[in-house]
Amino acid sequence: MDERTYTADATPDDTVTVAGWVHELRDLGGIAFLIVRDTTGKIQVKLEKDEMDEELVETGLDVTRESVVKIVGDVKEEPRAPTDVEIVPTAIEVVAEAETQLPLDPSGKVDAELPTRLDNRTLDVRRGESKAIFEIRSTVLRAVREAFRSFGASEITTPKIVATGTEGGTELFPITYFGEEAFMNQSPQLFKQLMVGSGLERVFEVGPIFRAEEHNTPRHLNEATSIDFESAFFDHTEAMDVCEAIVKAAYEAVAENCTDELETLGIDDFEVPDEAFPRLTYEEAIERINATGELDEQLVWGDDLPTEGEHALGQAVGEHYFITDWPAEIKPFYIKDHDDDETLSTGFDMMHPRMELVSGGQREHRFDQLVEGFEQQGLDPEEFDYYTKMFKYGMPPHAGWAIGGERLIATMLGLDNIREAVLFPRDRQRLSP
RNA sequence: GCCCGGGUGGUGUAGUGGCCCAUCAUACGACCCUGUCACGGUCGUGACGCGGGUUCAAAUCCCGCCUCGGGCGCCA
């Protein structure tokens, strides 16, 4: 297709070959219009019955919606055409014919439910709205990579097939690895920590994580994209600074590069967060939740925040915010406690008013305390020997975090289901496509 | 894992015991139409998830199964 012209680039008086999908055919009798769509937009092709070659007109009128066609013709300036230009064809080739009963309508005249759309994702992403989400997702991923690099972090990739889990407690997908028991990794946590002790020092990873929890909600996936960061010689406050900067960089990139996509999605009030994200302590958080009166029972120190409480707090705060200084007992063992108060963890969460986006903290880098943490969690440190032993050979203090990529996109765009932000979601009911 | 709520033409829907051999839109087929831009018009094709039960009568009520969505726990 070396001579192909995108529909958006068709300029009057050119002779072009455009290739794309038949979006619609409007037959008015003596004249008919074929609307051809490609990744850049749509263009109108005119068919005039008495003026043009009979066979050419017949080919054009017989073509079914969503068939792939190749049109050769002259581009004319035409104020009556939707884009002010139209093609007067000299040749129409049906490259790939589409069956007539489409499982969903890519022109968007008739809605389809999410499961129908996911079953037919190829057709779904021919729709402008779906396509816009994934163009934005692509921009977000590029922006976070660039932002990480500006902080001097190196991109790494770590194994997704592992012998042991990360935190032990979470459900893992078991697999068979040449006859041995193995698992799909639930987080790059341990591997990225191992790398802050390497010559790389500061790393990030964008990759899949797998969780076998049987939840069924608009904010959970069994395969998600984790955006991970970890740096040597960082404490939790510095990690939060980077976290905030990365999220803002993602918003900025979308605001700058995706105006058409935002318009397609009907988002006319897209705002890049510019204020510093408030940092609430856990204690302040439960006090504020209790003050809203939304919960039937008052929260007390040591409680995890229930979903209802998160929502109440999110509404009260109204923007992204951090929750810091959690009770040590409800944060994982690899997170370091405050030096001056062992009941307080350096762990933090970063919240969007609608849901949790990030969790992170300063890590326990001292070998003895780390091994003790494993034992307290009821885990056998021996099984994690590949990890713990590296803490014997000079592991610097370090901190980091992980963002749920799909949650970032879903909250950014106000999508009501996280599955909208994944091409082929994996959830409790869905393993295919 | 626990708890709710759904499944009606290809798609999206209306229909809470008889008015339903099932509504509307869109799609699809045929015909008419020379400037549409959700083109318009006429006619037509096409569906009650599966199995059992209650009833004179079931898309509608009951039971089981399958399937989907949601809430919670937990989490990113």
Image (cartoon, coloured by chain):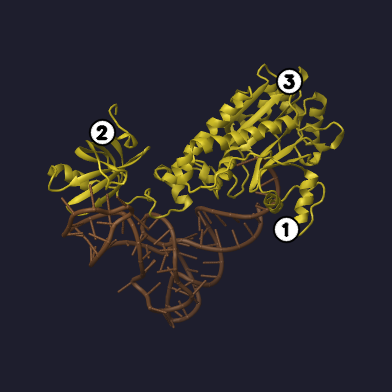
Q: Position of residue A195 (x, y in %)?
A: 67, 22
The residue at which mark 1 appears reads as A294
Q: CA distance from mark 1 to mark 3?
A: 47 Å
Q: Are marks 1 and 3 on the same chain?
A: yes
Q: Position of residue A217 (x, y in %)?
A: 59, 50
> Which chain does tag 2 point to?
A
Front in this rendered view, residue A245 or A323: A245
Q: Whole-percent x and y of residue B73?
A: 70, 50
Which numbered mark, 2 or 3, is in the foreground of this view?
2
Chain under callout 3: A
Q: What amino acid is labelled 2 in the image? A: Thr
Chain that bears disc 1: A
Mark 3: secondary structure: helix
Dot 1 alpha-carbon crowd within 10 angstroms: few under 14, some 14 to 19, many 20 or more: some
Tell me the residue at 41%/42% (across/down): A122
Q: Which residue corresponds to the image point at 57% horizontal and 39% vertical from the top-left? A: A223
In this rendering, the answer to whether A51 lies above or below A382 is below
Q: Secondary structure at mark 1?
A: loop
The location of residue A161, given as percent across then percent down, is 59, 29
Identify the residue at image location x=65%, y=29%.
A229
Whichever of callouts 2 and 3 sits on the residue coming sooner in the sequence is 2
User: Which colour denotes chain B?
Assistant: brown
Q: Give the amino acid type for the residue marked by disc 1 in the picture.
A: Glu
Numbered disc in front, either 1 or 3: 1
Residue for badge 2: A17
Which mark is first along the chain, 2 or 1? 2
Q: Is residue A213 above or below residue A176?
A: below
